[in-house]
Amino acid sequence: MEDGYIEVLVQRRPAARDRAAKILLISCTLLLLAAGVIFSPLILAGAAGFFLLDWLTIPELTAEYEYLLVKNCLDIDKIYFRSRRRPAGSYDLRDLERMAPAAGEKKTRGFKSCRGRNFTSKAPGAKTYQMVFRVRGKRRCLLIEPGEELLAAIKRKVPDRVFCD
């Protein structure tokens, strides 16, 4: 099982802020579209701009994340609308400096200044972990929700760099 395949799917929980943003964007688009039809065709350009903004923003608010661990490679994919998949990153566990709970102060104290990418559900109370990688001399930080099976597999591969409080 050392060269196994582990897959974890993290579904993003929509926050009230995300729902409000969707409603506001769609409402503005429809309002500008109606105003453009009734008053002036020039307003339709604003509606087209808001439609483009909707098209780019709404999928980001409904994304899911999939973590794949194959051998020593952790691949993270973003899934939009449960159908479109985009790679979000590929990380080699040999470049891992440290993995620890994000809420724990003891093991992540030196890495608080490291800005990174958030691949979690953003749900309150979710068990998130911070991963710090050294890639081409630069630090890259990730926040993930690994699950017990993925966490155990990473700990088996690099036991000296994974801390579970």
Image: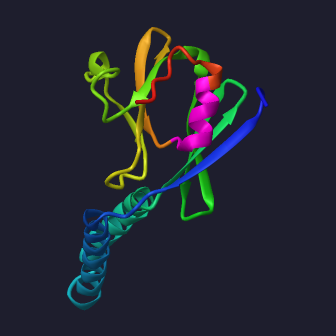
Seen in the picture, residue 163 relative to 135 is either above or below; the reply is: below
The percent position of residue 34, horizontal first and vertical second, equals 28, 87
Residue at (50% x, 11% y) in the render: 136
Q: Would you identify the image quadrant in which residue 113 lies? A: top left
Q: Does the segment drawn in magenta span residue 152?
A: yes
Residue occupying the point 44% across, 57% down: 12
Q: Residue at x 62, y 62 (%)?
A: 83
Identify the residue at the far top of this view: 137
Picture residue at 39% right of the left edge, 59% below the top: 61
State the residue in front, 20 or 55: 20
Give residue 140's position: percent from left, percent from top: 42, 23
Magenta stretch?
A: 146-155
Relative to 97, is 71 on the left or the right? right
Taking the image as shown, residue 17 lies to the left or right of residue 151, namely: left
> Residue 38: x, y in percent?
24, 91
- Magenta-colored stretch includes residue 46: no
* Prevailing SS of the magenta stretch: helix
Q: In the picture, which quadrant includes the C terminus?
A: top left
Q: Is residue 3 something one can see in this rendering?
A: yes
